Image (cartoon, helix red, strand yellow):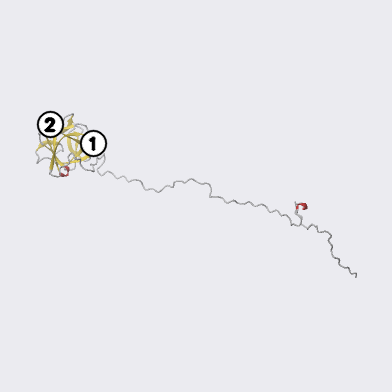
């Protein structure tokens, strides 16, 4: 068998191309010398951080509510009820602390029909006076109670039907409570808690109303 001597490989130039694999769709001239293949990495979509989103205007959150205000029925019954003045009666007729009674001369005028009270037939009281009326004297005691007298006449009492009549003396006169509601305006209340009112039919004064209203208001005009 014939032997061959191995001869070293002699490279005559230092410039050479390294072998690079051919990538389909790419020219070998696009590859750089002494570099590996330019492998394209598909670009990835970079997700940008986002804020909290569009601002939504603040909305009022409805607050839970109860069943609404409670309307308490009027314990005094239907119809307008005029409450007494919380400050008490005005200084016009308030009794003096130094005496048990005080006297005051007045005209009595109905707010309901704007007529003055007179002592008429057999002493019965009517609100029918235009410019003049009977003159009355209020004898005021403590606790805003009073007896009423017609000047130059008799004291007033309530008869068995509730009508006011001036035909008695001081001892037998009825006692009334004077409830101040507005300056010189008063409600006159009998001892049985009924209010004195002007009766529409004949404008007579009668103490039979369980409710206070316009027909039960009287103005005391000082003389």
**Place of residue 193 in the rendered image (x, y in percent of width and height, measured from the top left):** 18, 43
Which residue: 23% across, 36% down? 214
Q: Can residue 202 be seen in this view?
A: no
Which of 67/31 is in front?
31
**Measured from the top left, where is residue 189 in percent x and y?**
18, 40
Counting the numbered discs, the total is: 2
**Which of these two is toward me, 184 or 218?**
184
Q: Provide the residue designation for mark 1.
A: 214
What residue is shown with label 2?
121
Left or right: 40, with 120 as reference point: right
Please tell me whether mark 2 sits on a helix, a strand or a loop: helix
Q: In which quarter of the image is residue 157?
A: top left
Provide residue 126's location: percent of width, then percent of height. 16, 33
Question: With 9 as the anchor, is 208 left or right in this view?
Answer: left
State which quadrant residue 119 falls in: top left
Q: What element carries label 1?
A: helix
């Amino acid at each position: 068998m014939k032997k061959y001597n191995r001869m070293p490989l002699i490279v005559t130039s230092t410039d050479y191309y390294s072998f690079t694999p051919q990538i389909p769709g790419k020219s070998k001239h696009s590859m750089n010398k002494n570099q590996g293949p330019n492998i394209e990495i598909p670009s990835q979509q970079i997700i940008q951080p986002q804020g909290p989103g569009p601002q939504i205007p603040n909305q009022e959150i409805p607050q839970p509510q109860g069943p609404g205000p409670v309307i308490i029925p009027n314990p005094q019954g239907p119809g307008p009820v005029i409450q007494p003045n919380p400050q008490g009666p005005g200084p016009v007729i308030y009794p003096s602390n130094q005496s048990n009674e005080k006297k005051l001369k007045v005209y009595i005028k109905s707010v309901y029909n704007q007529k003055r009270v007179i002592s008429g037939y057999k002493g019965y009281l009517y609100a029918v006076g235009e410019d003049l009326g009977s003159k009355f004297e209020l004898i005021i005691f403590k606790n805003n109670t009073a007896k009423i007298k017609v000047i130059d006449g008799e004291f007033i009492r309530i008869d068995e039907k509730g009508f006011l009549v001036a035909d008695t003396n001081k001892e037998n006169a009825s006692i009334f409570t004077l409830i101040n509601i507005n300056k010189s305006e008063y409600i006159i209340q009998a001892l049985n808690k009924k209010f004195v009112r002007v009766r529409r039919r004949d404008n007579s004064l009668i103490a039979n109303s369980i409710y206070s209203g316009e027909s039960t208001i009287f103005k005391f005009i000082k003389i």
